[in-house]
Image (cartoon, helix red, strand yellow):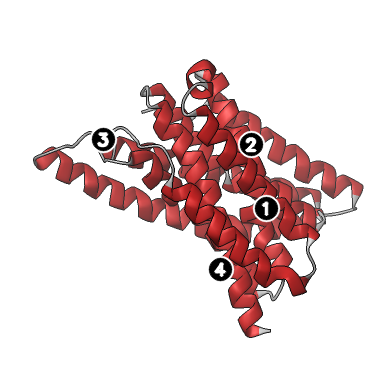
Amino acid sequence: MVFLQPLDLVIGGATLLFFLVSALVNNGDVSDSLRGALLIMLIMFVVGAAIEIIIEALRDLPGLGTAVGFITNGPEALCLVVGLLAGDIVFAASTPLGSNFMNPLMLAGAALGTRTLTAVWHDNRRSTLVTLTVTAALAGLFFALPEARYALWVGVTVALSAVLFWRRPADRQVTAKGAAASLRRWHAAAAAVLLAAAGYCLDPVVSLTAAASRAPKGVIGFFVLAALTSWPEFRSCVTLLRRGRSTSAVLNITVSNLTNLWLAALGVVVHLALH
């Protein structure tokens, strides 16, 4: 297993540069911004390592792409909860919904990096394009609607996403047996705990770094947090594509996008119930 990819350094460097420039432009705390950015890079490495272990442990699981799509949405769920606790539904929804625009870029980047772009492009292309287009459109629509239309958005989103999920392509099924399979499941459970811990640390570290750099909150939620929380999807796609499982990699992204819509819809329902 390769825990550190070259593109990890690229996204880490971009994160470092973003907070450094923001601190310089907005008269923020440069040293704290740099320290925070380095911590973010460390958390990203832990997330990547946990994803590698989970996929390796569950490599024979039927419906692996769907399972990984759910697993890698932990950071988005955490950011949603933090936004809801702050009473800001737009900020709460911005991370999962923003990820719907970042995830296809992560899939494309993983395919390019592993030289499997042709295989990914021809793998259930129609279904993939429809799902990615609809999930991105629904995500963008949320920000264009007044709060009075949120309930309607939830209804349409849940209905369409349920249909897309039900009609998703079938993943390759391989069944593992014996003690080795049981041991790998324990490895997956341990890595899932590590992933959850890393996700728990991500939001407060990003929040402190954002405060130090004085980066705009909207930019942090939609672009920075969305990109960082989509990084597990990128790492899982790279791992799956290197194992020749292009369908699993595509399902990882499409199911992740659908899950992001469900997270945002749940957040809206909670927000409307409380307000």
**Residue 241 screen position, x and y as percent:** 43, 25
Q: Secondary structure at mark 3?
A: loop
Give the CA distance from mark 2 to mark 4.
Answer: 31 Å
Residue that badge 1 annotates: 139
- Quick one: 260 or 29, which is closer to the camera? 260
For badge 4, the amino acid type reads Leu
- Residue lying at 69% horizontally and 76% vertically, measured from the top left: 87
Residue 45 in view (yes/no): no
N-terminal-most mark, 3 or 2: 2
Instruction: Please indicate whether residue 268 sits to the left or right of residue 255 in the image.
Output: right
- Quick one: 153 or 236, which is closer to the camera? 153
| Quarter of the image that includes the C terminus | bottom right
For badge 3, the amino acid type reads Gln
**Residue 89 screen position, x and y as percent:** 69, 69
- Quick one: 148 or 64, which is closer to the camera? 148
Please tell me whether residue 270 is drawn above or below residue 235 in the rendered image: below
N-terminal-most mark, 4 or 3: 3
**Residue 208 screen position, x and y as percent:** 69, 60
N-terminal-most mark, 1 or 3: 1
Residue that badge 3 annotates: 173
The answer to whether the residue labelled 1 contacts the one labelled 4, judged by CB atoms less than 8 Å apart, is no
Residue that badge 4 annotates: 266
Q: Secondary structure at mark 1?
A: helix
N-terminal-most mark, 2 or 1: 2
